[in-house]
Image (cartoon, rainbow, N blue to C red):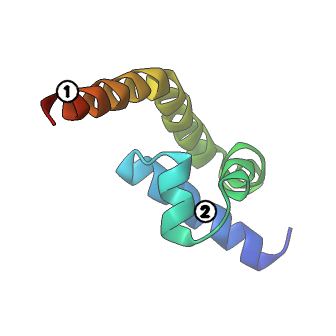
Amino acid sequence: MNDYLEERCEIVATYVVKRQATVRQAAKFFKISKSTVYKDITERVQEVDAELAKKARRVLEKNKAERSIRGGMATKAKYSRNKSS
């Protein structure tokens, strides 16, 4: 892996861990695709820093588990705005 990829993986993973960011948030912040963020965290960063990879993976798993809850809350908010109109 070249130096640019190693550095990007480490920066993206650090951002995700420090901010507890979702893949979408990280992709938007770094102006890269969601699939690139996911691949950086799940595969590439493992080669650079195994401990950071574990921490970032835990954040992704937590966000994935909460995804349906956030979706349900957004739907509820959407329909309560429509009712009040």
Real-space CA distance between mark 2 and mark 1, rounded to the nearest whole angstrom: 46 Å
Along the horizontal axis of the image, is 23 left or right of 1?
A: left
Closer to the camera: disc 2 or disc 1? 1
Nearest to the observer: residue 8 or residue 32: 32
Image position, residue 5 (x, y; %):
75, 70
Along the horizontal axis of the image, is 72 left or right of 53?
A: left
Q: Which mark is residue 10?
A: 2
Indicate the quadrant containing the N terminus: top left, top right, bottom left or bottom right: bottom right
Indicate the quadrant containing the C terminus: top left, top right, bottom left or bottom right: top left
Along the horizontal axis of the image, is 49 left or right of 3?
A: left
Image position, residue 72 (x, y; %):
38, 22
Nearest to the observer: residue 44 or residue 65: 65
Nearest to the observer: residue 71 or residue 16: 71
Image position, residue 41 (x, y; %):
66, 49
- Which residue is depicted at the point 72% across and 58% down? 36
Q: Residue furthest bottom?
A: 4
Q: Identify which amino acid the numbered label 1 is placed on.
A: Lys
Q: Secondary structure at mark 1?
A: helix
Position above or below: 28 against 66? below
- Which of the 4 image quadrants contains residue 81? top left
Q: 10 Å neighbourhood of mark 2: few (<14), some, or many (≥20)?
A: many
Q: Which mark is residue 64?
A: none
Q: 10 Å neighbourhood of mark 1: few (<14), some, or many (≥20)?
A: few
Q: Secondary structure at mark 2?
A: helix
Position above or below: 9 against 2? above
Position above or below: 63 against 14? above
Nearest to the observer: residue 47 or residue 74: 74
Circle nearer the N terminus (2, 1):
2
Q: Identify which amino acid the numbered label 2 is placed on.
A: Glu
- Which residue is depicted at the point 30% across and 33% down? 78
Q: Which mark is residue 83?
A: 1
